[in-house]
Image: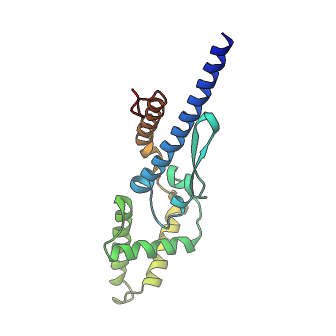
Amino acid sequence: MADFAKLFKSHQEHRGRRVAKAYVKALKRGKEYIVAHTLPIAFRELEHSFEVYALGTNGAELIVSAPHAAAVENGSRPHWVPIEPLIAWVKLRGMQGLTRSGRGSTTAMHAKSIRAELKSMQQGPRGGKYNLVDDANDVARRIQYAIAHVGTKPSHYVLRAMTTIDLYLHEEIEEAISTEHGIGQGIG
């Protein structure tokens, strides 16, 4: 009986390691899905701050460590933001809008919105002169003011990916368990 208990314990430990690896694989696939389908791109700070950490046999976790990750996911209350990153964002989105490029619906929407804003400024008090630097500063200041008064909307880039990540988790665990029993190895 002691040999059976030892064998059973070894089997459970092995299964735990395989399932833990499945969690890591599922979250890595989930990260790829988020980056490709739900993540606002801007300057890619969010994308480059994703990390998947194994938690031993307790699974894994996906951490997004960019300082603004939670505010992008959940939105934010009114607050004052520094102007320089906003100016850079407006220039990036404005240029994407002017060239009609941009990836994803959120990016395309922002690019078109900024393009329209910059183009409308051409008809403004400067008498039709287009000056990307001055106009980008004006648009960025208006965005800064709006964030200071109403906050930001949530994008829910992780929440929108949870159904897919859950599907990946089920697939990876099924693969780990079926391989464990020889099904995935052609032993049957």
Instruction: Look at 41% across and 29% down and name the residue there.
Output: 187
Q: Position of residue 32 (x, y in %)?
A: 45, 52
The answer to whether residue 2 is visible is yes
Q: Position of residue 60 (x, y in %)?
A: 58, 41
Q: Is 139 placed left or right of 59 in the picture?
A: left
Q: Closer to the camera, 49 or 157?
A: 49
Residue occupying the far front of the picture: 187
Residue occupying the far right of the picture: 2
Instruction: Look at 40% across and 56% down and name the residue there.
Output: 36
Q: Is 135 placed left or right of 1 in the picture?
A: left
Q: Quadrant of residue 13?
A: top right
Instruction: Look at 33% across and 88% down and name the residue there.
Output: 128
Q: Closer to the camera, 103 or 53?
A: 53
Q: Quadrant of the C terminus?
A: top left
Q: Is 133 placed left or right of 108 in the picture?
A: right
Image position of 18 with respect to 61: above or below? above
Q: Quadrant of residue 124?
A: bottom left
Instruction: Look at 38% across and 63% down and name the residue there.
Output: 107
Q: How is the image coloured?
A: rainbow
Q: How many marks?
A: 0
Image position of 83 with respect to 163: above or below? below
Q: Is 26 placed left or right of 125 in the picture?
A: right
Q: Position of residue 171 (x, y in %)?
A: 42, 36
Q: Closer to the camera, 90 or 124?
A: 90
Image position of 146 with respect to 27: above or below? below
Q: Closer to the camera, 4 or 25?
A: 4
The answer to whether residue 77 is visible is no
Q: Position of residue 169 (x, y in %)?
A: 46, 37
Q: Quadrant of the N terminus?
A: top right
